[in-house]
Image: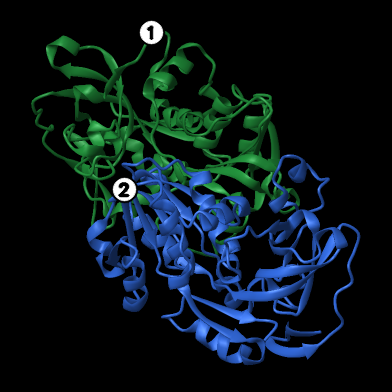
Chain colours: A green, B blue
Amino acid sequence: MIALHFENGQLVEKETDTPQVRRGEALVKIQYAGICSTDLEILKGYMDFSGIPGHEFVGTVETPRSLAGRRVTGEINISCGRCELCRRGLGKHCRERTVLGIAGRDGVFAEYITLPMSNLHVVPDGVSDEEAAFTELLAAACEIPERVYISQSCRVAVLGDGRLAAMAAQVLRLKTKGLTVLGVEPEKMRVIAGLGIDTLHAAAIPTMKGTFDVVVECTGSRMGLPDAIDMIRPHGTIVLKSTFHAPLKWNPSRIAVDEITIVGSRCGPFETALGLLQKKKVVTAPFLTSVYPFKKWQTAFRRARQKNSFKVLLDMQA
Amino acid sequence: MIALHFENGQLVEKETDTPQVRRGEALVKIQYAGICSTDLEILKGYMDFSGIPGHEFVGTVETPRSLAGRRVTGEINISCGRCELCRRGLGKHCRERTVLGIAGRDGVFAEYITLPMSNLHVVPDGVSDEEAAFTELLAAACEIPERVYISQSCRVAVLGDGRLAAMAAQVLRLKTKGLTVLGVEPEKMRVIAGLGIDTLHAAAIPTMKGTFDVVVECTGSRMGLPDAIDMIRPHGTIVLKSTFHAPLKWNPSRIAVDEITIVGSRCGPFETALGLLQKKKVVTAPFLTSVYPFKKWQTAFRRARQKNSFKVLLDMQA
């Protein structure tokens, strides 16, 4: 099969064997693979990954026969199922885990992948392939209200204007009337505002010191955390979503002085995300920038890096 | 009156007027003033403070007559009582606040201070002046279980071997059987171990990756937070106590990846602290390094800076 490999700091197209299916696993033919900020960070050296990157996908099961032909998406953490963390229900943090296209396991910029069947989620009828490709991203947004209680009167800021910010904003406006998205890219902010969500340019942050009860940091940038701390009220809660390769020089004393809570958050519940897509409570179409045929992967990665891009998909079958 | 002033980067002894008592305030004659890590950071430039530093004290009320002669200690945040944060019960975060000896208000390295009467707590009989001088510090430790639920089976690490760590360890061993204190100074670790608390040298941190459910960071050092993140299990909670002047260069991505919660914590409940002292559930005597007469303040500050020091008090009446 054809796949993208990241090795020696370079992303290259290569012909490799179709992956071998182990016990309990399914072989999935990838339809769409999404390019995520984490992938772009991996190409800068984050996680010291080598192999086939990519973790957002929708595809069709080839084997086993019991699932063959079903459209699926899948959770990215492959855990041992036996350790203390797995037994506590924290399988996504299993120390023996591999992570699809991120750590120790080949990912979805390929014609085929294998995944444990327990990681798969069948895409409901009425959810398109393009929508289903947003499931992993939307699940990460759905995790926010799982970790932090958000009431209707809660003043919530989403910091960022990217793909995750757009999903987080849609999930959070189901919880609160006090939502504002702060970003910088006028084109992307217009799309978010087009959904009837309040938006503000991030240049306003210095005038909003201590304003918000909850700040959801989705910038993907190392300045996201210091900015969030500027905006949060004393005793407020920051949800930290961004991971990045380069370190930050910064004084965290304000966390103690203002008794701020910071909640790190990564992957979330796929069933909740698929349910929101099925009920059309979250839209993805305005956030699908482009779909490129696999052969145009270099153009696709360039497009994904552009500041005015939301989600770029690779069509692995075109 | 005589007092220590911090001005132009220097701590100097000066004769000044006794402070004027405003409406609602008491005039307190200071008996003991404690030297805290925050004071030592202020002398390095933290908070850009100028004036009389110091915020840990026990003293005797001079006026008003209704309280005259009572032994008191006092909360350090002086809030407006009218703003949104004050009305929410978050007076210690009032944006208009001054903070005794830390921000906008002269502190306790002086013969007299003024404080609003609502900030004062009468020291119960059976609590000595020396013990009462630990109240503000112990209250900060008592805030930890107010912010984070700690069960009997919770594996808790206190990171640090200083005065706050010693108080935190004593408060937390009332909550859990799984307490370990990690520090570096052999002399101080021996004193903590002498209370029957498990101790380990901080050199063991790299072997304890992901071990603890809760890590209470009391190092006073900027490496405390990265060390705490090394020790915490995925989905665990770090209580961050340290404030310091110099910034930290560091990558916070692990917070998101391991979905860690960080809870900043500063001042705590004085009544709880005084109650623990009165019931002898917390001891302070092993942690009182020295009491110096005021005239020897330079020696006292030198002693407080030494790595093997716990609490150093200035006797303002000697």
Residue B97, horizontal then vertical, whole percent: 77, 58
How crowded is the residue under tag 1: few (<14 C-alpha within 10 Å), some, or many (20+)?
A: few
Residue type indicated by callout 2: Lys
Residue lying at 46% horizontally and 63% vertically, measured from the top left: B283
- Say which of A144 and A151 sits in front: A151
| Residue B281 tag number | none
The residue drawn where x is 45% and y is 54% is: B171
**Which mark is drawn over residue A125?**
1
Query: Residue flagged by tag 1: what amino acid is it?
Result: Asp
Compared with A122, A289 (above or below) is below
Q: Residue furthest top?
A: A125
User: For the N terminus of chain B, which image quadrant?
Assistant: bottom right
Q: Where is A140 relative to B265, above or below?
A: above
| Left or right position of B29 against A223 | right
B202 displayed left or right of B39:
left
The mark closer to the camera, 1 or 2, is 2
Category of crowding for the residue at label 2, using alpha-carbon neighbours closer than 10 angstroms: few (below 14), some (14–19), many (at least 20): some
Apparent side of residue B237 relative to residue A50 in the rendered image (left or right) = right
Q: Is residue A223 visible?
A: no
Quadrant of the image for the C terminus of chain B? bottom right
Q: Is residue B45 above or below residue A51?
A: below
Is residue B122 visible to the viewer in this orientation of the structure?
Answer: yes
Give percent across and percent down for residue A58.
Answer: 32, 23
- Which circle marks residue B177 in the picture? 2
C-alpha span from label 1 to label 2: 52 Å
Could you tell me residue A66's position as x and y percent? Answer: 15, 10
Q: Chain of mark 2?
A: B
Q: Chain letter of disc 1?
A: A
Which SS class for mark 1? loop
